[in-house]
Amino acid sequence: MSVLLSKGEVVRSLSILGAGGHAKVVIDSLEQSLESSQIKILEEGCETSRKLLELYPVESFHDWSYIDEYCHIAIGSNEARANLGKDAEIYGKKLVTIAHRFALISEHARLESGVFVAANAIVAPEVVIKTGCIVNHASVVDHDCSVGEYSHIAPGAILGGGVNVGKQCLIGAGSVVLPGLSIGDGAIVGAGSVVTKSISENEKVVGNPAKRI
């Protein structure tokens, strides 16, 4: 099952907010659990008629009253996801967590609302993935990690055991964060970097070992 819900909840219609590349990945994961007729794709300011993955019409998003009770924000930008997530809460919408059927998620991990876990990602025991995060293709979040709200663990990135990632962080593709380190809110780790020391809020690092830029 790709849609992860509390016991007893059933999704009969799901609004996907966003119609870019990340939305394609999310929809591909959903095809294992929902019919195309149950999925509505919406994009802010969409004025032209087009389809996503040649099957799903993209509609213009102007009003939260048009959004289904259950929705998922399929946008790569951490800031954009966070802003829409706040609006969803104001309008009483439920953010659905979605995981690809080939993601490996421990039964002892906790995923909060609005999380997306892509194919071949690994989420180990005692991990907490907070609201609105993306755990992208083939990334690894090892035991006892915590990933803050609306952060993005990019494809192939590895978090060693006990890493604490703050809010709205980007851990770049193919990067490695050594065990037990902390990544401050809003920090960015460049692709392919090896982080050997904790990183402060809003800090940008790159390289092996990673250094501030």
Image (cartoon, rainbow, N blue to C red):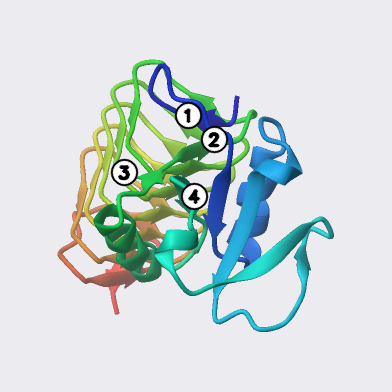
Are discs 1 and 2 less than 8 Å apart at CB? yes
Report the mark closest to the observer, 3 or 2. 2
Q: Decide which of tag 4 and tag 1 comes sooner along the chain.
A: 1
Q: Residue at x 53, y 48 (%)?
A: 136
The label on residue 178 is 3
Q: Decide which of tag 4 and tag 3 comes sooner along the chain.
A: 4
Name the outermost residue toward the front.
65
Q: Check disc 1: other Cα within 10 Å, few if <14, some if 14-19, many if 20+.
A: some
Report the mark closest to the observer, 4 or 3. 4
User: As shown in the figure, which amino acid type bears the numbered disc 2?
Assistant: Ala
The label on residue 68 is 4
Q: Residue at x 65, y 47 (%)?
A: 39
User: As shown in the figure, which amino acid type bears the numbered disc 1?
Assistant: Leu
Q: Residue at x 61, y 49 (%)?
A: 26
- Residue 207 visible to an observer of this rendering: no
Cα–Cα gap, marks 4 and 3: 41 Å
The label on residue 160 is none
The label on residue 99 is 2
Are discs 3 and 2 less than 8 Å apart at CB? no
Q: Check disc 3: other Cα within 10 Å, few if <14, some if 14-19, many if 20+.
A: some
User: As shown in the figure, which amino acid type bears the numbered disc 4?
Assistant: Asp
In the image, 174: left or right of 144? right
Q: What secondary structure is marked by label 1? A: strand
Residue on which the image places disc 1: 4
Report the mark closest to the observer, 4 or 1. 4
Report the mark closest to the observer, 2 or 4. 4
